[in-house]
Structure formats: structure tokens, C-alpha cells
Image (cartoon, rainbow, N blue to C red):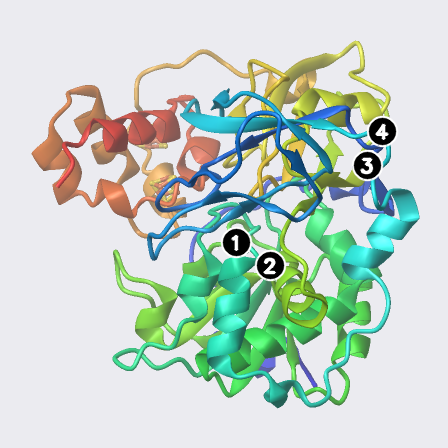
Amino acid sequence: MSAKLVDLPGKGTFERGVHPHGHKQLAAEASIEVVPSPSEVLIPLLQHTGAPCVAAVKIRDEVKVGDVIGTSDAFISAPIHASVSGTVGKETVATLPNGRHVRALPITAAAEQPLQGQALLNDIYGGEWSTQALDRFEPDHIVKTIREAGIVGQGGAAFPTSVKVTPNEKKPVDVVLVNGCECEPYLTADQRLMQEFPAPIITGALLAGQACGAGQVIVAIEDNKPGAIAAMRKAAEGTGVKIAVVSTRYPMGGEKQTVKAVLGRIIPTGGLPLDVGVVVINVATAAAVARAVLRGKPLTHRVVSVTGAGITQPKNLLVPVGITYGELIDCCGGLTSEAARIVAGGPMMGFTLGDLRVPVTKGTSGVVVLTDADVRKSEETACVRCGRCVDVCPLNLAPTKMALAARHQDHDLARRYHIMACMECGCCAYACPASIPLVQLIRVGKAQLPKE
Ligand code: SF4
Ligand code: SF4
């Protein structure tokens, strides 16, 4: 079954937002390639929203791919697994792209890895993914398996998936919405996954639906990905999963925007999809659920787009968690002479990287290298009160007011303007003719707020 814009209660779109140039063509035709096994990985013990893990191994322990190396008893957390076979080094500190310092375990890779190249890709995404008799898996079993496999949202926020799909009597769920929008410019990892390996996504989506008791499973894809739409429609035939084609508009991939576009439901300010009966998971997350439940394998690898005009040969790479951004860039022929800025994630919501030794985590969707021409922009000038930032904010917030409150460290004012509700999508900064760094200011304002 499939649905087009007009069939959808939400008409396939949402209000406000922007239309930045997609630049998807740079890597959209690049089939997923497996990165050569690194000699060492550095695996952060916090890669998700929630409580950090503590090391479950010690220096000089020998580990195999998939062994648990970090655990936590907290409800909102996810265990961490070895992404290579090898020897554990001394616990250290890793700096993540957002500047956060977290504890991390290095693993020196053994000369022989159990699976490499195409065999690894096939093991993770290839082969048969049955959609038959999935009701033999009890919801509790699916939730427990997702937790033990360390699965978190791979769309960026890295929220533990087991928490999302745990049935909640007070807030019943009727729809699992699988997010294949990938609205950030440049990024094509989800697009390639849907196009090349739609089957595990469909199976994982059905399993997630079963875990949380949702009667409907819908996959949302922007209409600028015809190859992915065709592949997903074919894989969904006869399964009951609907493919919903939504319009290409940034930030369609935001949970509030996808839920509105597909279902016409409005998530309240500060609320969650759960508040309107929906669980949203990313397509790669759904595939990880299928692998965990049907093959008993944890989340150790992910697909990352390495793209932008500053990259010699843009690619979509299957990589182990803990490999560095620098190694990904090397695997794509290195930087071009015009490379000017390296961004972890997409250019709208990502973080500028100052150090290429930063490790990839479960939530890393891409690395984009921009050129001088891409980043050339005018100096910041005074606000001209044009109101464009307000006009484009998909959450109907007041970006100028929040930024001003942040500049003056006025916490009460920042709260009054709902600064914590800002999803940092970057639409306001994108639209601002005065080049005011609205998102950076809002991020600082959020960080300054005293913890409640
Ligand atoms: S205020 Fe926040 S949510 Fe609104 S456009 Fe700016 S970054 Fe996006
Ligand atoms: S878009 Fe920029 S210049 Fe216009 S009102 Fe907003 S902050 Fe001011």
C-alpha cells in the first residue's frame, strides 16, 4: 500500500520551514561501500540521550565484535558494544562534535576481523528478512532485545529506541511512523539504505509496531527520492506497511513536522509524538531492530554520508562506531583544495569540526565538507526587524527574542519564549538577511539555563 500527498490527513506538508539547495546529487548515486577495517576505534561510553554507560571491560581484555563493553542500569540509556574484534586499551576521554567530553574506550583491532567488505554489508543488511509470523515475538521480548542490542535513534537525536517502543498504558500508540525523510541538505545515507536494503527496514518497522502495540506502520519519504520510494513500495507489498510520500521541505524530518505532514496531528509545545499516539523511528533504526530480533546482532556499524564539494569522491560508507571522521575523509580520497569547513551532520543542524580525530557514534549521519564558495557570507549586521526568522520557524517560536535573551543571559525571558522547545533546525539563521547567528545564540542560551 502507498499514499501520496493528497491521501494523507496532513496533506504531506507542514507550515513554514525553508527550501535550501539539496546538493543530494553529490552522493545520491554512490552505492553503500564498506570502509576498510580501521587499526583502532575509540568508542564513547555516551552516544545517546540519557545516562552514560560505565565500562564493562578493562584494559588488555580481548573482545569480539558485538561484545558488550559499556552498560548502564538507567531506564533511559543503551549499552555499548565493540565494533571491532581486538584488545581494549586504557579508558580515556573523547570530545564529541558538540564539544562535550565523554569517557571512551579505545580498542586496537586484531589483524583478522570476522567479517569485512561485502560479507559484512550482507551480514548487516543483506539476505532474507521475513515479514511472516512476526507475531511469534512477544512485545516484551522485542523491547528487551532492542535494549540489549544498544539501539538508539540513528537520525541524529540518538534517543534509546527501547524506551520509545515500551508500551505505555497512559499513552497508547496507534501508529509507528518510520522516518525516511532525510531532509538535511547533502545527506544520502538513509536514501541509499532505503534504495539498496528496503527489506530489513520494513521488517524492523513491523517489529517496532508489534512492540508498542501500534496497528499502523507508515514510512514517510520526501518526494525528492524516487529510487528509495520505488524500492520501499516494492518491499512493502503485501505487508500492510504504507509508504507515505511527503513534500520536500526542510525540516520535514523533524518529528513534529513528519507527524503533522503524514497524520495531520499536532504535537503540543514541549510534547512528544507519544502525546498524539505516535512512535517515530528512523529507517536505519528500523533496520537495526530487524537485525537484533531476527539475527541476534547488536548495533555496531552504521551508514554515514561523506559528501560536499570539499570531498574528492563523495560516498556513503558502512562504518564501525568509533572510527574517526578523518579516516572517513581519507577513504573518500581526502579533501579538495577548496575545502573550507568540515561539518559533522548536515549543514543546517550539524557542528563544525575542529579535530578530525573525533569518533563516529551511533547517531552520526554524515560528514559534509563545504568549500569557500559554500560558506562565504556577509558579516553580521544589526537586526532589521524584517521578521523572516519568525516567518520560517516551523515551531512558531520567536528566534530574535530567544537570541536576545541569550545574549543578555536573561533566563526568565528565555524560558518565557520557550527556548528549550527550539529544535535547532537552523531555518531562522538560514533566512536571516543580517547573518545573525541565531541558532548558536539559542544553543548558548539553552546551555546557560540553570538546571531545574
Ligand atoms: S527558533 Fe529554533 S526551531 Fe525555530 S527556526 Fe530557529 S532553530 Fe528552528
Ligand atoms: S531574520 Fe534576522 S534581521 Fe530579520 S528579524 Fe530575524 S533576526 Fe532580525
Residue 381 drawn above or below residue 360: above
Q: CA distance from mark 2 to mark 4?
A: 30 Å
Amino acid carrying mark 4 in the image: Ala
Query: Looking at the image, is mark 1 or mark 3 earlier in the sequence?
Result: 1
How far apart are the two marked residues, 2 and 1, measured between alpha carbons?
6 Å
> Looking at the image, can residue 343 be seen?
yes
> Badge 2, how many Cα within 10 Å: few under 14, some, many 20+?
many
Mark 2 or 4: in front is 4
Residue at x 52% of width, y 54% of height: 153
Residue 315's disc is 3
Q: Do tag 2 and tag 4 residues touch (Cβ < 8 Å)?
A: no
Question: Is disc 3 in contact with disc 4, using a CB cutoff of under 8 Å?
Answer: no
Q: In the structure shown, which secondary structural element does the residue marked by tag 4 occupy?
A: loop
Neighbour tally class for label 3: few under 14, some 14-19, many 20 plus, Cα within 10 Å: many
Mark 2–mark 1 contact, CB under 8 Å? yes
Residue 167, image x, y percentages? 38, 77
Specify the label residue 153 is tagged with. Answer: 1
Residue nearer the viewer, 24 or 328: 328
Of circles 1 and 4, which is in front? 4
Given the current orientation, which residue lies at the most extreme left position? 412
- The kind of secondary structure element at disc 2 is helix
Of the four image quadrants, the one with ligand 2 is top left
Residue 27, x across and y down, in percent: 80, 40
Which quarter of the image is occupied by the N terminus? Answer: bottom right
- The disc at residue 111 is 4
- Mark 1 vs mark 4, CA separation in Å: 31 Å
